[in-house]
Amino acid sequence: MLPRQPKQETKMAYMNQDLKSQLAPQIKSVLKKYNIKGSISVRNHMVLVVNLKSGKQDIIQNWFDNAKNQPQYNDRKLEKPETLQVSQYWIDNYFDGKVKEFFIELFQAMKGNKWYDNSDIMTDYFDTAYYMDVNVGQWDKPYQVEV
């Protein structure tokens, strides 16, 4: 019989209005720098959400132009979406230029100095300060490019 392993302390992702208000000035300054309008919210006490509503950058076109070159889209027709959900882990693959710079700065601002990620997906162990969602447009209101 194998010796029993010590139990790891389980931490849970947590986000609240107080943490959001601490991160909001940095997030708003990034939005202002790139002339993008958006809102910041908290979902389920564990997700910091930034919803991008409109701006000078054509984020969806930038994604579409870069996604066409991805191998998973080679065998099928890719249609330009009206909305996007952006993952911090795929910025390098799906965006370039000013839009890529914007997302790098936005996720840095969303992380602030309190975010950490000690997750180990190989053992199905997730330990992060909080999750982050960035939505470009909403299901009922697509992102608008300002001219």
Image (cartoon, grey):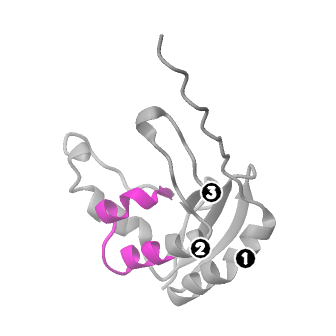
Mark 3 or mark 2: whose residue is earlier in sequence: 2
Indicate the position of residue 71 as horizontal and vertical percent values.
20, 47
- Mark 2: give few (<14), some (14-19) or many (20+) Cα within 10 Å: few
| Magenta stretch: includes residue 96 | yes
Furthest residue in direction top, as rendered: 1
Q: Which residue is mark 2?
A: 113
In this view, the residue in front, 6 or 22, is 6
Residue occupying image coordinates x 51% and y 73%: 108
- Mark 1: give few (<14), some (14-19) or many (20+) Cα within 10 Å: few
In this view, the residue in front, 132 or 66, is 132
Mark 3 or mark 1: whose residue is earlier in sequence: 1
Please state the extent of the stretch shown in magenta in the rendering. Answer: 84-105
Mark 1 or mark 2: whose residue is earlier in sequence: 1
In-image side of 43 versus 131 (left or right): right
Q: Which residue is mark 1?
A: 22
Residue occupying image coordinates x 57% and y 58%: 133
Indicate the position of residue 90 as horizontal and vertical percent values.
37, 58
Q: Residue 74's quadrant in the figure?
A: top left
Q: Which residue is mark 3?
A: 129
